[in-house]
Image (cartoon, rainbow, N blue to C red):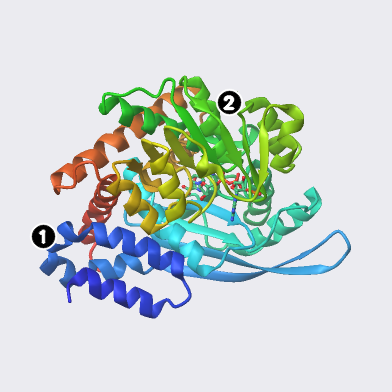
């Protein structure tokens, strides 16, 4: 059996009940075959693949907090520090009832390669909890975040591990966590990113993932002799990534026509009303079914269905495995040209294969959603030099990083005979840098 297959088998056997982690490992390792084949002896001797699929460490802890009725609630907290070969661990915190160790490990594993692609000095990690923020009061959110940080503070630091937001974690949660870290440790340092602008946050961090997604799509289309202007775009999700993807799509002259949350989705034939979407989601924290009250021409549907809408570009921006084989078939039948992942691993493995086999240009999350962590890296730089950069400075750097990622993954794919396969290109380009650093640092 080849080295890649041996390691995949080992991962599946040693990590039962972690299907998302298996999925992420299989996708990466399968596309690394030509690189591994070319270096098999050296990689085997250094156990490179065994080391890259095993996190440096994983913390699991109890998070007790008191709800508004005086009842004690208990959640489970996680932080997985996956790999720090090229910089301090870096990656978001997810608060969602579906969170478990396998989900956090898949996200941490992906983050290693994504952060490498940004060109910034960041290792990979991820954390979170099965806490459900929906329907909680501000005080309950604060109680949870404080309790969570009362344990997490032991493992993080500005030069050690720098968490940020993900699903269910935005500026409000980062603020409560930062305050608790500062109180316990007595230091004001850039230990979290996505902070508020009055205490060390970076301009353009809120917009970064969605904007970055559109920048890389724009560059890719340009290099394929096409233009994003005039394209119809379908988006899933109605959170941080989706909202700013929709904003940038409008700014670049495209027309975003859908959004979705976990309850349902909207199709707005006139294009999504950004102000209404922000009011519903960012200000009122309501369900998307409120949208037709602002836009009587729009349709609201319960359940799933975004991928049945005819469009040129599809941007899954909600969660893992939200775009399956049937959805891929519907997209292809409707003539979609591009699928770019705003979320982490939103496309199932068989759907990804189907899209690529049918000529759809596919940009994987590691490359396409790297804008968020890139601006987190820029927030760390600003905190280190105790300065603030303007929105334009950060946005210009973000655009440069995203176009650079496109050319890097395109070149890596070509180098190994995978022209146009950006899944392979992203995995190979991300992997090569991390492995070079691991080998240089010896067996640690
Ligand atoms: P938010 O919490 O801001 O928004 C998440 C959105 O996705 C919400 O509309 C939510 O709906 C929907 N959603 C979440 N889980 C599900 C589910 N199981 N089924 C259907 N819909 C769901 O998160 P973000 O926008 O920050 O994150 C979205 C994705 O982007 C995630 O995969 C995340 O890992 C990834 N990502 C985020 C980055 C960031 O900087 N924030 C950076 C890179 C990637 P509802 O409100 O109903 O739950
Ligand atoms: O998946 C991701 O890249 C994020 N949630 C952002 C991580 C970060 O550290 O900004």
The local crowd at label 2, few if under 14, some if 14 to 19, many if 20 or more residues have their Cα within 10 Å, is some
Q: Secondary structure at mark 1?
A: helix
98, above or below 379, in the image: below
Residue position for label 1: 38
156, above or below 336, in the image: below
Name the residue nearer the viewer: 222 or 153. 222
How many labels sit on residues? 2
Residue position for label 2: 271
104 lies left or right of 82 = right
The local crowd at label 1, few if under 14, some if 14 to 19, many if 20 or more residues have their Cα within 10 Å, is few
9, above or below 293, in the image: below
Q: Is residue 349 visible?
A: yes
Which quadrant holds the C terminus?
bottom left
Q: Secondary structure at mark 2?
A: loop
The x and y percentages for residue 66 are 81, 64
The x and y percentages for residue 256 are 53, 29
Give the image quarter of residue 12: bottom left
Which quadrant holds the N terminus?
bottom left
Give the residue drawn at x 58%, y 55%.
94
Ligand 2: does it lie within 8 Å of the C-beta at label 1? no
Residues at marks 1 and 2, CA–CA distance in whole angstroms: 49 Å
Q: Is residue 390 visible?
A: no
Q: Which mark is residue 171?
A: none
């Amino acid at each position: 059996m080849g080295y890649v297959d041996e390691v995949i088998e080992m991962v599946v056997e040693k990590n039962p009940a972690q299907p998302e982690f298996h999925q992420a490992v299989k996708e990466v390792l399968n596309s690394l075959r030509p690189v591994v084949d070319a270096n098999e002896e050296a990689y085997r001797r250094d156990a490179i693949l065994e080391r890259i699929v095993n996190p440096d460490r994983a913390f699991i802890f109890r998070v007790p907090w008191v709800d508004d009725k005086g009842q004690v609630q208990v959640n489970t907290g996680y932080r997985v520090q996956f790999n720090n070969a090229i910089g301090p661990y870096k990656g978001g915190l997810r608060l969602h009832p579906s969170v478990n160790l396998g989900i956090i490990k898949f996200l941490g594993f992906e983050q290693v390669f994504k952060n490498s692609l940004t060109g910034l000095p960041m290792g990979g990690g991820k954390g979170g909890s099965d806490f459900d923020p929906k329907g909680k009061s501000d005080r309950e959110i604060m109680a949870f975040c404080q309790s969570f940080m009362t344990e997490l503070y032991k493992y993080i630091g500005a030069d050690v591990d720098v968490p940020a937001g993900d699903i269910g974690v935005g500026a409000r949660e980062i603020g409560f966590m930062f305050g608790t870290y500062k109180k316990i440790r007595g230091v004001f340092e850039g230990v979290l990113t996505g902070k508020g602008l009055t205490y060390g946050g970076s301009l353009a961090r809120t917009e970064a993932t969605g904007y970055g997604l559109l920048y890389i799509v724009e560059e890719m289309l340009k290099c394929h002799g096409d233009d994003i202007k005039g394209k119809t775009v379908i988006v899933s999700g109605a959170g941080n990534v989706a909202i700013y993807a929709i904003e940038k799509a409008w700014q670049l002259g495209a027309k975003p026509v859908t959004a979705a949350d976990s309850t349902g989705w909207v199709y707005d034939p006139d294009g999504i009303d950004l102000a209404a979407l922000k009011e519903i989601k960012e200000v009122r924290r309501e369900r998307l079914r409120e949208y037709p009250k602002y836009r009587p021409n729009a349709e609201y549907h319960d359940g799933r269905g975004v991928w049945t809408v005819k469009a040129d570009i599809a941007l899954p921006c909600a969660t893992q495995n939200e775009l399956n084989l049937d959805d891929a078939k519907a997209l292809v039948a409707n003539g979609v040209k591009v699928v770019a992942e705003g979320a982490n691993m939103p496309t199932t493995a068989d759907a990804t294969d189907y899209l690529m086999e049918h000529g759809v240009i596919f940009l994987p999350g590691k490359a396409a959603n790297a804008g968020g962590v890139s601006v987190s890296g820029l927030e760390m730089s600003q905190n280190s030099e105790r300065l603030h950069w303007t929105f334009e400075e950060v946005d210009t750097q973000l655009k440069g990083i995203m176009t650079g990622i496109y050319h890097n993954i395109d070149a890596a794919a070509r180098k190994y005979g995978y022209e146009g396969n950006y899944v392979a290109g992203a995995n190979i380009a991300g992997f090569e840098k991390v492995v070079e650093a691991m080998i240089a640092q010896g067996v640690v």
